[in-house]
Amino acid sequence: MKTILEVKDLYKNFYNKEGEIEVLKNINFTLKEGEILTLLGPSGSGKSTILNILTKLLQPTSGEVNLKGNIGYMFQKDHLLEWRTIMDNITIGLEIQKKKTPENISRVEKLLKTYDLWDFRNMYPKELSGGMRQRVALIRTLSVNPDILLLDEPFSALDYQTRLLISDDVYKIIRNEGKSAILVTHDLSEAISMSDSVVVLSKRPATVKSTYDINLRQNENLTPLQTRKVPDFQNYFDTLWKELDSYETK
């Protein structure tokens, strides 16, 4: 697989009245085409800062980001506009980019039909469940046809059962659409079940402690929920737990 993103020797410092705060320290990782990579680490370790650098919302203090393609960002909250219909929410990115062409609208309509949202296109966000709102948010991100999806703890606001179901939905959509993705989470089970590889970050200043390839899908059709039942899942969980525990207890 080709490399679609390379993060090389990335550093990020912030400044306040107390002085300089080092947030990221020598971050290195690569993302392959069609891969789902998870950044795993404790809260406040700089995971979202990395995503903000990838989208150029922030500039790194030093280091390189080599990107082949464009990025779509799915936030922790769905940020749907309550006064716009589902269809109008999904196409807002196309409007902003002045790309609301018949071809792109046709592609959005196909996404809505494929992922069971077509019948809801004229409804408003308040009429949908939390899980369905997140599915709409993902389709909105896909509407601009990004090469890489950035998912910043997209399930954290959902109850546990809905979180499991929606993670299956999101996984299937990413795979079906042939996208690469970076998922940010501090949930071990989520990281293992969703990912092809996991980058473990230390507490701040974040460094890359280790990177793990996750090889649980001999059957490519396994969903994240089904993957949690594969015997080797527990081995990955125990290994990553020790990685996290090794610095969180110090």
Image (cartoon, rainbow, N blue to C red):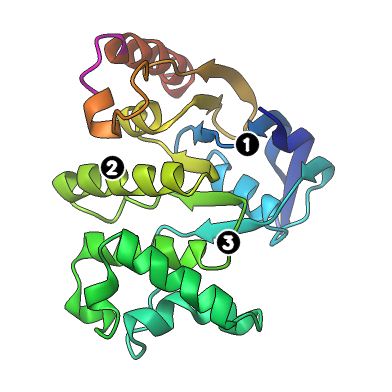
Give the residue number, with chain letter if any, for mark 3.
145
Q: Is residue 171 found inside the magenta-colored segment of the image?
A: no
Q: Which is nearer the eye, 26 or 189?
A: 189
When the figure is inspected, residue 220 is found, relative to residue 21, above or below; the finding is: above
Whether residue 78 appears in this view of the structure is no
In the image, taking residue 157 as reference, residue 5 lies left or right, namely right
Give the residue number, with chain letter if any, for mark 1.
33
Give the residue number, with chain letter if any, for mark 2.
168
Give the amino acid at mark 2. Answer: Asp
Where residue 56 sits, quadrant-wise, is bottom right
Label 1's element?
loop
Residue 243 is tagged as: none
Q: Which is nearer the eye, 23 or 9?
A: 9
Q: Which is nearer the eye, 53 or 1?
A: 1
When the figure is inspected, residue 32 is found, relative to residue 96, above or below; the finding is: above
Q: Residue at image x 62%, y 32%?
A: 206
When the figure is inspected, residue 237 is found, relative to residue 100, above or below; the finding is: above
- What is the C-alpha distance between the residues marked 3 and 2? 21 Å
Q: Residue at image x 40%, y 64%?
A: 111
Q: Choose the circle earlier in sequence order: 3 or 1.
A: 1
